[in-house]
């Protein structure tokens, strides 16, 4: 079972798009809970989270990891959307692997090579599937989900993600 953590700040529209892409995982019983870790939003982010049945925390990623019920965590940026087929790939990965994994960018969403090289890469742009145990250990020194994911060696999943637009 998987817990989804989304760290957000003033991105109610992006959060709604991300939550919509998780519905299939909830129906299949793969997504156990969704935790929205809010970093001081002043918009209606809390209402979007509450209407979708998510746990809403006004705090950092470490608090979210502590409340997660699943043995595996899926960290996403608000606005990212998982493409069809992600459920089977994540289930297969968590059954046989212990290392973290990231999604592949959707073909229509890929940026040209030089643009990727010279732009500031976001560590969570492709999401992150990580064991709760490993995330808990990393969260002790990380102030955000982005910091937790940065520089982490991971496997590439054969499932696609539509990356959230840069802010």
Image: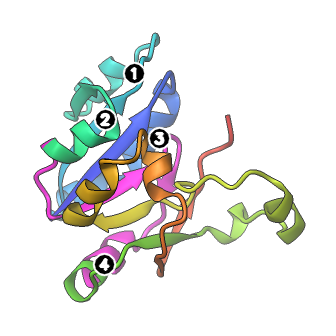
Image mark for residue 17 = 3
* Residue highlighted by disc 4: 88
Marks 3 and 1 in Cβ contact (< 8 Å): no
Q: Earlier in the sequence, mark 2 or mark 4?
A: 2
Which one is in front in this view, the residue at disc 2 or the one at disc 1?
2
Percent x, y for residue 109? 69, 61
Q: Secondary structure at mark 1?
A: helix
Q: Secondary structure at mark 2?
A: strand
Q: In screen coordinates, is 95 left or right of 166?
A: left
Camera-side residue of 135 and 71: 135
Q: Secondary structure at mark 3?
A: helix
Image mark for residue 45 = 1
* Residue highlighted by disc 2: 36
Q: Point out the image quarter for the N terminus.
A: bottom left
Marks 3 and 2 in Cβ contact (< 8 Å): no
Q: Secondary structure at mark 4?
A: helix
Whole-Å distance between the Cαs marked 2 and 1? 9 Å
Whole-Å distance between the Cαs marked 3 and 1? 12 Å
């Amino acid at each position: 079972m998987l817990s989804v953590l989304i760290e957000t700040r003033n991105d109610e529209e992006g959060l709604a798009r991300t939550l919509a892409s998780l519905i299939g995982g909830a129906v299949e019983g793969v997504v156990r809970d969704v935790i929205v870790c809010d970093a001081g939003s002043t918009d209606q982010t809390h209402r979007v989270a509450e209407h979708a049945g998510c746990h809403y925390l006004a705090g950092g990623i470490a608090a979210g990891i502590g409340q997660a019920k699943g043995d595996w965590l899926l960290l996403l940026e608000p606005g990212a959307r998982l493409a069809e087929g992600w459920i089977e790939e994540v289930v297969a990965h968590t059954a046989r692997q212990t290392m973290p994994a990231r999604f592949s960018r959707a073909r229509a969403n890929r940026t040209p090579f030089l643009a990727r090289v010279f732009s500031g890469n976001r560590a969570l742009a492709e999401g992150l599937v990580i064991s709760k145990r490993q995330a808990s250990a990393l969260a002790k020194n990380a102030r955000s989900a982005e910091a937790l994911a940065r520089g982490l060696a991971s496997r590439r999943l054969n499932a696609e993600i539509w990356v959230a637009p840069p802010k």
